[in-house]
Image (cartoon, rainbow, N blue to C red):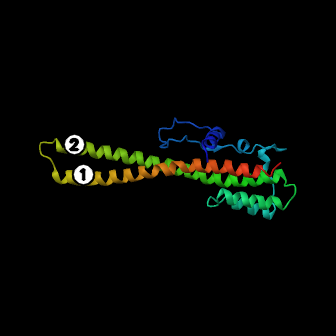
Amino acid sequence: MNVLLGLCCVEYVQAASFDDPTWPCQQRKVETLSLAILWTAPLPDGPAGLPEVVLPPQAAELAALLAQRRITLEEAGAAVQAFASGDENPDPVQMAAIFARVFDALGGIRLRIIRGIEDYSLKQIALSDKIDRVRSEMRALENSETPDFDRIDALEEQLDWDERIFRDRSKSLTYVCETPVLIEKRLYALAQILLKHAD
């Protein structure tokens, strides 16, 4: 994916903002994507009617295949080409309905990932607060006239453990935060593949 594709994905999302203090990612938190902006071909009833379209078995199988994230875009393109070649004039509404199913499937996965990131962030915030409390208690004990060295040792051990967990979680945060964006880019690419056969 090139930079232009990434910029396009930023433009088609809705309700993007950086004003959530619990959102840990550099990427904008975007909960809702717009199918209508991704699918640029005209539709007689608009995108709202797509979920009502009944897909024949082959079209439903194609939608299920495209919704699998392990399928490469090259494989997706070949599958769409094979499907479209079976009909001299592929129905544009049917192609849009195929994308709508893919959009719903991947959009659902993406939203669950975002919810997981939110939970992940709250756990990190709670752990950070805990680390601060332990440090404060250690300082108070160390400055006491009669320090409880056993308690200080126990707190130090706990602090080492909590800080290690915090660091390990932070290292995996970059990958976790990129996942919703990767799904957005995939949806955009799949829409372009299907649109080639929707004229």
Instruction: Name the side, left or right, on which 48 lies relative to 87.
Output: left
Q: Quadrant of residue 85?
A: bottom right
- The spot of residue 184 in percent (x, y) is 63, 47
Residue at 16 percent across and 50 percent down: it is 148
Judging depth in this view, the residue of 175 and 20 nearest the camera is 175
Q: Amino acid at mark 1?
A: Glu
Give the residue at the far left of this rendering.
Answer: 145
Describe residue 54's horizontal placement relative to residue 31 as left or right: right
How far apart marks 1 and 2 lie (CA) works out to 11 Å
Would you call the spot at circle 1 few (<14 residues within 10 Å), some (14-19), or many (20 or more)?
some
Give how far across and how far down residue 134 sits, in percent.
Answer: 28, 47
Q: With 116 as the anchor, is 166 left or right in this view?
A: left
Report the residue marked by disc 1. 156
Which residue occupies the foreground of this view, 118 or 37? 37
Task: Tell me the residue that label 2 is attached to.
Answer: 139
Q: Of helix, strand and loop, which one carries label 2?
A: helix
Say what secondary structure mark 1 lies in.
helix
Q: Residue at the location (70% across, 54% down)?
A: 102
Which quadrant would residue 78 be assigned to in this image? Answer: bottom right
First in sequence: mark 1 vs mark 2: 2
Q: Residue 109 shows which numbered tag?
A: none
In the image shown, does 104 or 149 lie closer to the viewer? 104
Q: Position of residue 154 (x, y in %)?
A: 23, 54
In the rendered image of this protein, does residue 98 appear above or below residue 135?
below
Q: Which amino acid type is marked by label 2?
A: Arg
Q: Is residue 184 left or right of residue 170?
A: right
- Tally of numbered tags: 2
Would you say the residues marked 1 and 2 are in contact, meaning their CB atoms lie under 8 Å apart? no
Disc 2 residue crowd, few under 14, some 14–19, many 20+, Cα 10 Å: few
Depth check: give the residue in front, 164 or 86: 86
